[in-house]
Image (cartoon, grey):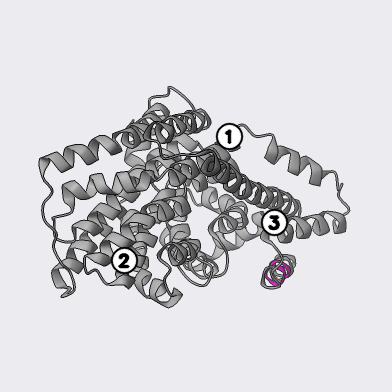
Amino acid sequence: MTAALILFALILLLFSRVPVAFALGGLGLILIVLGDLSPMMVPQGLYSVVDNFILLAVPLFLLMSNVLLKGGVGRDLFNAVQSWVGHWPGGLGVATIISCGIFAAISGSSVATAATIGSVAIEEMSKRGYKKSFVYGLVAAGGTLGILIPPSIPMIIYGVVTEESIVDLFKAGIGPGLMLAGLFILFSFAYARFSSAYKPIQKASWAERKKSSLRALPTVILAAIVIGGIYLGVFTPTESAAIGFAVSLIIVYSLGTMTWHKLKDAVMESMQTTVTIFLILAGAKIFGKAITLYRIPQDISVIISENFTEIGIFVFVVCMVLLIIGLFLESLSMLLIMMPVLYPSVLNMGIDPIWFGIIFVIMIECALITPPVGLNLFVIQAVGKAPMQDVIRGVWPFTLIMLLSVFIIYWLPQIALYIPYNF
């Protein structure tokens, strides 16, 4: 009964448009006071969020991705990939997904990936006869690779909340990320094959390929430094973010695409996003501590264990719940509200928490492209100056592809677990 009342109060606050951070933190404080517990837990929770070395990676990855976005790196990257695969059937769609995958391996941000690649790909694909709704959906979905292909900001948050290895989570994201990118590419091939509006483009010359590839080479090297350094144990995810930010500054200034004004905008936007994320984290920390003291996660864990004895049914129910709440909550809020409640049940049922983290992140990806609050929808609407209904019409096939990928990973868990447990 207590759990139902708390859940009702939280939903009421969220539907009343109270900011997520204050809804979580305020409700947590009320629960602590009503439970005759020390309010000192609140400042302690706030301090523990700020005083966390691992979370330093979040603003640093945001800074890196915003610097690359403002520096116009996306155009060079897209042009280079296009020169190699643009003449294939659906080649520009393939180039878009590959570009998203490479940028995802740098930024860790879905929004930054969608904005960076979308600012170039939408115009190029529209000129070549691709239906606009398909273009919007492809770029919005391709952007979600930013939180699945490592490094990933949500994976960092998941690791902090569950105290699981962030490096293992990053490794686990490689296989599913490549698989999902491959499914998007196959859909692009199919679209080109059966669409009457598609117009093939001429194969680029070797001179054009060389020129565009050299221009994009620093970005590929940056991705190799960030990812390779983490997996080889040269530096931690936080250190890799700092090194990546420094190298990204060198790249954009060497290319002559960065100005003081653009750098200032990148820093300010990163700061605003960081403050938002940390406020939500702080609110979730207080809320999580409160519901733990009320033994709500433990009680829910018992209910789930008694009613869902099969792992498949449990995962199915969780995915359906995430799909529904993803219509109303943004991705980070979903993670911070749901994981403190679900994690004890995951452990009790013997589910691998690294594998479950990948399932969770893919469902977060779905939330990024489902209306009415999918962030990538708004990014593509702004970048492409598109009617929202066209963007929504374009994303639904990709939502189905993401759900298909969850099904595949459930039946073939080694797609996610082979690399972290063998390398």
| Mark in the foreground, 2 or 3 | 2
Label 3 sits on residue: 21
Residue 260 at x, y = what percent?
A: 54, 38
**Residue 333 figure quarter:** bottom right
- Name the element at disc 1: helix
User: Dividing the image into 4 quarters, which one contains the N terminus?
Assistant: bottom right
- The answer to whether 151 appears left or right of 27 in the picture is left
Specify few, some or many for label 2: CA neighbours under 10 Å numbering under 14, 14-19, or 20 or more: many
Q: Amino acid at mark 1?
A: Ile
Q: CA distance from mark 1 to mark 3?
A: 20 Å
**Can residue 313 be seen by looking at this rendering?**
no
Residue 51 at x, y = what percent?
A: 69, 34
Q: Amino acid at mark 3?
A: Ala
| Mark in the foreground, 1 or 2 | 2
- In the image, what residue occupies the spot 21% across and 60% down? 186
Label 2 sits on residue: 135
Q: Is residue 234 above or below residue 361?
A: above
Label 1 sits on residue: 54
Q: Is residue 117 above or below residue 379?
A: above
Whether the magenta-drawn stretch holds residue 11 is answered as yes
Q: Which mark is residue 265?
A: none
Q: CA distance from mark 2 to mark 3?
A: 34 Å
Residue 110 at x, y = what percent?
A: 45, 52
- The answer to whether 333 appears left or right of 172 in the picture is right
Which residues, given as a range, are shown in magenta? 9-13
